Amino acid sequence: MRLPQPLFQAIFRERLNRFLGLAELDDNEIEVYIPNPGRLQELLIPGATIYIHEKPKPGRRTRFDLILVETGGVLVSIDSRMPNRLFEEALGQGALKGFEGFHLEAREFRFDGSRIDFLLEGPRPMLVEVKSCTLVEGGTALFPDAPTERGRRHLRHLTHRPRGFEASIVFIIQRGDAVEFRPNSRLDPGFTEALREAHKSGVEVYAYLCQVTLKSIQIVDEVPVEIPN
């Protein structure tokens, strides 16, 4: 998937709130939109190199979107909306290991008072929830980076899915330096327990690595998933 162009290199200075940051571009202080409500504490640190895209719009507070962060020489996509687009693109190309024979039936599928990202059709109907993962420690991708009641709720819905439906949860690692995925038990043991119970109920758990450049991002490989007992 192509990233918006052109991208300008800037320096991150401060996070003002969940969706607003302060950066330095060509010696000028600017505000940037952060399209991710997660903590991102290991990424959005003062002095970090970031890449931003100018997106002026009438009535909009900021002129720039924050697209990428560089950490230890690794480019990380921080847009939490991107994984759904990447999943849909790879599915449509037939390039998503584990989802052969499935096609998109509906987005934001509603059931049991909640919305699940995708309904797929294939050998059997399948519910799919997609999560954005940006935290990597020692080669291990971790989700979440903060406690998430919403994430636990989605897992409960998948666990108690309608009869005859399959279900999957997919973690899109928006960087290329992970070799495995684990739920972040230290930060959210409740999510780990919910994931464990969902998996026991038959929910498949997938994690995919991305190749990120200054011009594009794409899913390139599946990585092993380790769920603590």
Image: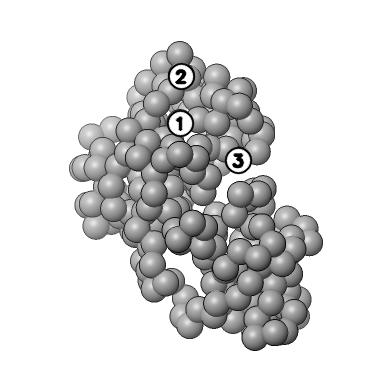
Q: Nearer the viewer, residue 21 or 200?
A: 21
Residue 18 versus residue 190 in the image, above or below = below
> Left of 203 or right of it: where is 132?
right
Residue type at the position of mark 1: Arg
- The residue lying toward the viewer, choosing from 189 and 203, is 189
* Place of residue 5 in the rendered image (x, y in percent of width and height, measured from the top left): 46, 80
How far from the left and from the top, in percent, is residue 31?
73, 74
- Whether pointer 2 and pointer 1 mark residues with C-beta atoms closer than 8 Å, the reply is yes
Query: In terms of secondary structure, where does tag 1 sit?
Result: strand
Pointer 3 residue: 145
- From the top left corner, tell me how far across and down residue 150 is, in percent: 63, 36
Q: Do the CB atoms of the residues marked 2 and 3 lie less than 8 Å apart?
A: no
Q: Which residue is mark 1?
A: 182
Disc on res. 228: 2
Q: Calculate the distance from the C-alpha at mark 1 to the C-alpha at mark 3.
A: 12 Å
First-in-chain label (1 vs 3): 3
**Residue 24 seen in the figure:** yes
